[in-house]
Image (cartoon, rainbow, N blue to C red):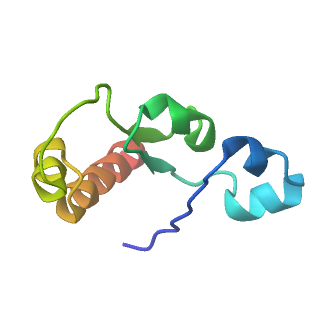
Amino acid sequence: LAVRVISVISEGLFFSQKPEYIKNILPDNIPRFGLSAGLPVTLQTLVGDQGRVIGLESFGYSAPAEVLDQKLGYTADTVFEQVVEFLKEIRS
């Protein structure tokens, strides 16, 4: 699976860049999948209407990171499966 991974620390700073830069990082007409440890809405502008964002709708869980990752679906395998499913859905 060939993917492009970007990390946007500040949406405000990112979208204040020149349009050419933004299009170079986020080309038009490509599937976009966002992963956030926070609210999904924080990445919606980046993925657009046709994209998908996985995030948390609640907070306050307490456990070792590995346990939380497993329980909340943030393992590499789980995220990979979600991306593959998303790509199948948009291509069908």
**Lateral position of residue 76 relative to residue 90, left or right:** left
Is residue 6 something that shows in the picture? yes
Residue that extends furthest to the right in the rendered view of this protein: 18
Relative depth, front residue between 60 and 42? 60
Q: Which quarter shows the N terminus?
A: bottom left
User: Looking at the image, is 57 positioned above or below residue 2?
Assistant: above
Is residue 50 something that shows in the picture? no
User: Looking at the image, is 12 positioned above or below residue 17?
Assistant: above
Q: Measuring from the top left, give residue 37's x and y in whole percent.
A: 37, 44
User: Looking at the image, is 77 positioned above or below residue 88?
Assistant: below
Q: Measuring from the top left, give residue 90's x and y in whole percent.
A: 41, 44
Residue that extends furthest to the top in the rendered view of this protein: 58
Kindly indicate the quadrant of the structure image that contains residue 60: top left
**Lateral position of residue 3 relative to residue 72, left or right:** right
* Residue in the image at 24% along x and 52% along y: 74
* Residue in the image at 16% along x and 39% along y: 62
User: Looking at the image, is 79 positioned above or below residue 55?
Assistant: below
* Residue in the image at 37% along x and 52% along y: 87
* Residue in the image at 20% along x and 59% along y: 75
Relative depth, front residue between 88 and 6? 6
Q: Measuring from the top left, give residue 14's x and y in whole percent.
A: 74, 50
Q: Measuring from the top left, give residue 92's x and y in whole percent.
A: 36, 45
Total label count? 0
**Lateral position of residue 26 relative to residue 16, left or right:** left
